[in-house]
Amino acid sequence: MLQKYWQKMRQFPVVLLFFAFLFGFSLFDLCWPDRDFSELENRKLEQSPRLTLASLVSESDPWTAKYSSYVKDQFALRDSWIDLKSRAEGLLLKTENNGVWLGKDHQMFAKFLSIGRRFEVNLDSVERMAERHPGKVHVMIVPSASLILTDKLPWQVPVADEDACHDIIASRLDGKAAVYDTRETLRARSEDYIFYRTDHHWTSEGAYLAYEQFARQNGLPLFERDPALERQAPDFYGTNYSKARTWNAVPDIITYYDLPNILRIYQTNRDGTETVGEGPLYNVEDFSTRDKYKAFLRGNNGYSVLQGDGTGSILVIKDSYANALIPYLTADYATIGIVDYRYLNERVDSLMMRGGYDEILLLFSFQGFMNDLTLSAKIAVAS
C-alpha cells in the first residue's frame, strides 16, 4: 500500500520538494535560538510568553496575540528574509516598504498619513505650562523631513497636513511662550544635508540651523563650530533603513564636536534613592555600534544635567531630536537640565524648583510631539 502511494507521489516531484522543505524548515526553526535584541531593526524582540489560563482567556492582553508576535520576531533567518523581501520590492520599483516612503536621492521618510487627537492634548498641556511660567517658556517643534524635503518625496503620496498644525502651535501659544517656527529656516537650506537619508532624525547641520535661530532670537552668543573639534562617525544606517532595508541605501555620516563639558545622569533606584553618573557628553563607543545616534548625550535618560560655558540655566524637555542640538547650548548657559518624560515620572514644576532653572525649552520633532503619551501628565498641572 505504501509503495503504491509512494509511486503516485513520485509523479509530483514539486509537491514532494515543497513538503520536504516545509518539514525541514519547521525543524530548523524549532532549533533556531531566540534573540533578545535585533541590531538590524534596533529594537527588542518579543520573547516566548508564559502560558496561563488567565492569559489564554484575557481579552485585553491575550496570550495568542503575544505568541503570534513572538513567532514573527523569532522566525529563523528573519534578517535574511527581510532583506530578500526588500530586494524583491526594490526590483518592482515600489515607493513604500514597511511604513517608510522611499524618495529621491535615497531619501527615506517615515510614513505620515494623519494627525491624531494626541496633538491637541499635548498642545493644550504646553499652553497650561506656559501660563504657569510666564516669560520663561520656549517652544520648538521641529517639522518633519516630509514637510521640508517635499521635492524628494515619492510622487503624490498622501502626506498629512502638518503645515496647518505648525500654524496652530504659533497661534495658540502667541503671547504665552516664545515659539521658534523653523519651517522657513530649514526650507531655505533644503538642498543641504539637514536630514539623515536613512534615519528619522535631523543631522547636526539641521540642528545647528534651528539652534542659530534660537540663539539669534534671544541675543545669545553663537556656538563656534571649531573644525579642530569636529569629528565624524561614518556608516550610519538609521531607523528608516531598519524598517525598509533597501538594497541600495546610502549610509549617513554623523558629525559631532569633541567638547569637554561634563554630563551628569540621575538614575532613580527601586528603593527611591538616586544614583548620579558622570561622564563625557558623548559615549564615543556607541559610534562604533549600529545605533550610532544614541552616542549623543549618552542615550535617552530620564533626567540629566549638562555643564555649560555660558550664564544662567535652562531646562530642556525633549525627545531624541533635541540630542543633536543640546551640545550647542553649552555656549549660552552654565547649566542645562535635560528631561525625557518617557523615562521620568517627576513633574516639570518640581524639576524647575529642584534645579532652580531660569527658563524652559520644549524641543520635539513634530511626530514625536504628536505621538507622545507621557508629556501631558507631567507638564499640564502643577506638582
Image (cartoon, rainbow, N blue to C red):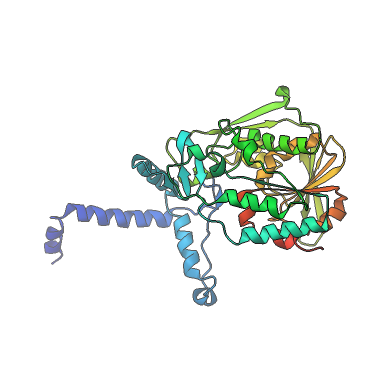
The x and y percentages for residue 367 are 60, 51
Task: Please state if 279 lies on the left or on the right of 109 as rendered.
Answer: right
Q: Is residue 249 visible?
A: no
Q: How many marks?
A: 0
Name the foreground residue: 326 vs 288: 326
Name the foreground residue: 346 vs 154: 154
The x and y percentages for residue 102 are 45, 42
* Rendered position, 121 above or below 304: below
Question: Could you tell me which quadrant the C terminus lies in?
Answer: bottom right
* Rendered position, 21 above or below 249: below
Residue occupying the point 43% across, 45% down: 156
* Rendered position, 74 above or below 255: below
The x and y percentages for residue 377 are 72, 63
Residue occupying the point 36% across, 41% down: 93
Question: Could you tell me which quadrant the N terminus lies in?
Answer: bottom left
Q: Residue furthest top?
A: 228
* Rendered position, 244 above or below 256: below
Name the foreground residue: 3 vs 260: 260
- Rendering quarter of residue 283: top right
- Rendering quarter of residue 236: top right
Residue occupying the point 67% across, 28% down: 231
The x and y percentages for residue 75 are 43, 54
Task: Please state if 20 lies on the left or on the right of 194 as rendered.
Answer: left
Residue occupying the point 65% across, 34% down: 204
- Rendering quarter of residue 252: top right
Q: Can residue 10 be seen in this view?
A: yes
